[in-house]
């Protein structure tokens, strides 16, 4: 007798749980449609990963204003030239910055590539964290 009661209680609990965890197929389909495809997802991950170091975000922010050499950037971000060069290498890999030789100097700027635009928009979003006067 009490086995039947337990079975009935469990049956009620599972039905209640099903009602609370009901999945709306339309909502799931709409959300899945917003996801990037495999190749595009990998590309987006590489772009975002390039900003995982605060120094690279600072480089993108600095290059929004004007093209700069490694020496100038290293002063702006307070890192060594070697460290700055390594950060620039990562940003060049995702085509966010370009390097142009001008005499004995190499000048870096944000590229015209979409990746640079994405990173610039992220940097602009972080500008909202600045305190206002």
Image (cartoon, helix red, strand yellow):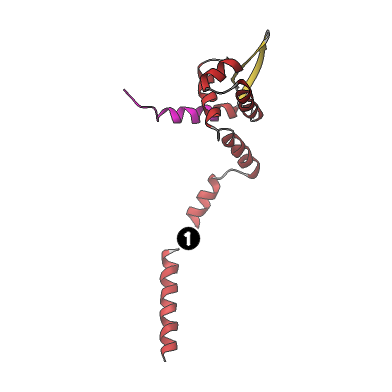
Residue appearing at x 47%, y 60% in the figure: 23
Percent position (x, y) of residue 28?
51, 54
Residue appearing at x 40%, y 80% in the figure: 9
Residue beneath disc 1: 23
Q: Quadrant of the C terminus?
A: top left
Q: Report the residue that reaches farthest toward the bottom.
A: 1
Magenta-highlighted stretch: main secondary structure?
Answer: helix
Is residue 124 rendered to the left or right of residue 116?
left
Residue appearing at x 56%, y 45% in the figure: 35
Dot 1, how many residues are within 10 Å of its Cα: few (below 14), some (14-19), or many (20+)?
Answer: few
The answer to whether one can see residue 34 in this image is yes
Q: Nearer the viewer, residue 45 or 77?
A: 77
Q: Secondary structure at mark 1?
A: loop
Residue appearing at x 62%, y 39% in the figure: 40
Percent position (x, y) of residue 92?
64, 26
Q: Is residue 19 above or below residue 59?
A: below
Is residue 17 rendered to the left or right of residue 111?
left
**Magenta region:** 118-133
Q: Any magenta on residue 119? A: yes
When asked about the image quadrant of residue 12, the answer is: bottom left
Is residue 86 rendered to the left or right of residue 21?
right
Q: Nearer the viewer, residue 27 or 20?
A: 20
Percent position (x, y) of residue 56?
56, 28
């Amino acid at each position: 007798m009490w086995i039947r009661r337990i079975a009935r209680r469990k049956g009620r609990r599972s039905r209640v749980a099903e009602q609370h965890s009901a999945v709306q197929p339309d909502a799931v389909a709409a959300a899945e449609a917003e996801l990037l495809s495999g190749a595009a997802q990998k590309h987006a991950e590489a772009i975002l990963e390039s900003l995982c170091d605060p120094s690279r975000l600072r480089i993108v922010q600095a290059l929004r204003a004007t093209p700069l050499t490694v020496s100038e950037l290293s002063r702006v971000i307070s890192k060594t030239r070697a460290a700055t060069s390594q950060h620039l290498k990562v940003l060049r890999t995702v085509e966010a910055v370009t390097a142009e030789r001008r005499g004995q100097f190499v000048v870096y700027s944000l590229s015209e590539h979409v990746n640079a635009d994405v990173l610039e928009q992220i940097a602009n979003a972080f500008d909202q964290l600045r305190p206002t006067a």
